[in-house]
C-alpha cells in the first residue's frame, strides 16, 4: 500500500469519551446492562464512523456486538471497552464477527494479571482468504488437506507445481499434510506445503493446546477442528510471500498473539493507544510470559535504567509473599461458530439453529442478568 494511502487512513481511535462513559467501559457487559452497552457505543459513534467502511454504519456494528453477546454468552463477562475495541478492529478489517461466514470470531479471554475477562479476536482461515484477496493482486486463494491414499506430488525447479488427485474410491486414509495455493493476477502461482509434523509443531507451541493437554481437556479446536486449524496455519505461512495490506498484516499479527496466549490490548483502542505488532517487534519478548496458557503479561516495558533517576536512600521493602498459582485454562471455542465449547450443553446449543436477530432481541438480551 502506498505511503499516501497509509497517511490518509484515520487513527484507530482518537476520540475520548466523557468520563462517566469511560468508567462504564471498565464494567463487564453483564454488570452494565444493555442500556449502558448501547450508550457506550453511541458515545463513541463518531470514532466508529471515522473508522468504518462506507457500507457499514455504527448502528450496524452495535447490533453486531450485541448479537455476539447473544450467540456467545460468555462474552457477557467481558469488559465493555474490550468489546468496543474488538468491534472497531473488526470494522477496520471489514470482517463481521461471529457470523456463519466464519471470517472472524470474538471470544472471552481471561487476563489474570488485570483480573478481568477481555474480548479477544480469533481470525478464521476464511477470513484470511478474504483479506488476502482484497489486495487486488490475488485472483484466488485456497487451502486443501492431503491424505495418505491421495496421489500427491510437488515439483520444485524452474516451474514449481503441485499435483494433487484425491482418492475417491473409499477412505482416503490419514492426513499427511496441508497446502495453500494463491493464483496471482497477471499470472504466477505461489503455494506452501506443510507436513503433519510441521503443523503439529505449530499446534504444540499453542498456549491453548498446551493448557488443554495439561488439564486433560479434549475440547480444544486443535482436536475438534484439526483440519480447519491446519488450513489456517498453512495459509498464514503463505501470506508471508503474498502481496499484503494493513488489514491482512493486522489479522495475522492478532491471530499470532491469540495463538501464543498473549493479550491483544483491545481495551486500549478507546485511548488511541493500540497498535498491532507481530510478537517480538514491540521491544520485549513475549515468550514464556504465559506459563498457564491464558495468563497474560500486560505490564509495560521496564524503564531504561540509563535515563531513570534513582531514588535517594530507598528503604528496604519487605519481601512479598508469593502468590499461589491457580490452574488457568484457555477458553475453548469452535472456529466454525465462535461459540465457547463447554461440554454437551454447549454442543447442543451450538447444534440448534440460531434465530434471526431483531431489535427486541437486543432489548431482552440482559433481561435475565
Image: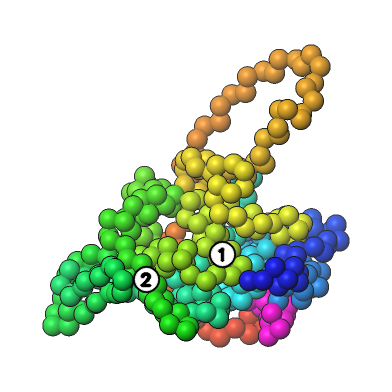
- The Cα–Cα distance between marks 1 and 2, rounded to whole angstroms, is 18 Å
The verdict on residue 29 being magenta is no
Q: Where is residue 343 in the image (x, y as percent from the top left)?
A: 39, 62
Q: In this view, does 22 lie above or below 281?
A: below
Question: Which residue is denoted by mark 2 in the rendering?
Answer: 191
**Image quarter in which the C terminus is found:** bottom right
Q: Where is residue 163 in the image (x, y as percent from the top left)?
A: 24, 77
Q: Which of 363 and 247 is in front in this view?
A: 247
Q: Is residue 277 above or below residue 300?
A: below
Q: Is residue 291 above or below residue 182?
A: above
83 left or right, relative to 232:
right
Cβ atoms under marks 1 and 2 closer than 8 Å: no
The verdict on residue 66 being magenta is yes
Residue stretch rendered in magenta on the structure: 53-67
Label 1, secondary structure: give it: helix
User: Of label 1 and label 2, which has the lower sequence position?
Assistant: 2
Amino acid at each position: 500500500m502506498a505511503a499516501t494511502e497509509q497517511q490518509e487512513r484515520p487513527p484507530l481511535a482518537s476520540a475520548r469519551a466523557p468520563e462517566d462513559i469511560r468508567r462504564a467501559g471498565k464494567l463487564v457487559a453483564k454488570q452494565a446492562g444493555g442500556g449502558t452497552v448501547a450508550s457506550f457505543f453511541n458515545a463513541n459513534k463518531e470514532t466508529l464512523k471515522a473508522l468504518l467502511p462506507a457500507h457499514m454504519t455504527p448502528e450496524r456494528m452495535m447490533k453486531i456486538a450485541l448479537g455476539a453477546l447473544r450467540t456467545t454468552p460468555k462474552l457477557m463477562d467481558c469488559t465493555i471497552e474490550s468489546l468496543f475495541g474488538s468491534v472497531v478492529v473488526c470494522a477496520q478489517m471489514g470482517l463481521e464477527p461471529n457470523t456463519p461466514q466464519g471470517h472472524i470470531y470474538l471470544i472471552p479471554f481471561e487476563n489474570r494479571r488485570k483480573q478481568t475477562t477481555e474480548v479477544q479476536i480469533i481470525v478464521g482461515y476464511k477470513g484470511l482468504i478474504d483479506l488476502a484477496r482484497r489486495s487486488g493482486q490475488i485472483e484466488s486463494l485456497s487451502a486443501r488437506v492431503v491424505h495418505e491414499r491421495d496421489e500427491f506430488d510437488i515439483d520444485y525447479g524452474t516451474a514449481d507445481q503441485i499435483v494433487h488427485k484425491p482418492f475417491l474410491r473409499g477412505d482416503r486414509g490419514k492426513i499427511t499434510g496441508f497446502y495453500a495455493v494463491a493464483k496471482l493476477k497477471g499470472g504466477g502461482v505461489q503455494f506452501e506445503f506443510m507436513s503433519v509434523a510441521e503443523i503439529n509443531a505449530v499446534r504444540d507451541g499453542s498456549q491453548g493446546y498446551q493448557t488443554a493437554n495439561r488439564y486433560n481437556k479434549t475440547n480444544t479446536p486443535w482436536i475438534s477442528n484439526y483440519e480447519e486449524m491446519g488450513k489456517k496455519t498453512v495459509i498464514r505461512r503463505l501470506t508471508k510471500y503474498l502481496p499484503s495490506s494493513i488489514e491482512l498484516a493486522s489479522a495475522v499479527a492478532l491471530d499470532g498473539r491469540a495463538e501464543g496466549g498473549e493479550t491483544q490490548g483491545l481495551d486500549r483502542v478507546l485511548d488511541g493507544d493500540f497498535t498491532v505488532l507481530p510478537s517480538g517487534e514491540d521491544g520485549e519478548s513475549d515468550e514464556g510470559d504465559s506459563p498457564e496458557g491464558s495468563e497474560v503479561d500486560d505490564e509495560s516495558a521496564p524503564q531504561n535504567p540509563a535515563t531513570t533517576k534513582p531514588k535517594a536512600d530507598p528503604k528496604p521493602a519487605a519481601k512479598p509473599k508469593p502468590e499461589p498459582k491457580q490452574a488457568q485454562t484457555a477458553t475453548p471455542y469452535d472456529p466454525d461458530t465462535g461459540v465457547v465449547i463447554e461440554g454437551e450443553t454447549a454442543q447442543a446449543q451450538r447444534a440448534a439453529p440460531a434465530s434471526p436477530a431483531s431489535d427486541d432481541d437486543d432489548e431482552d438480551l440482559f433481561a435475565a442478568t
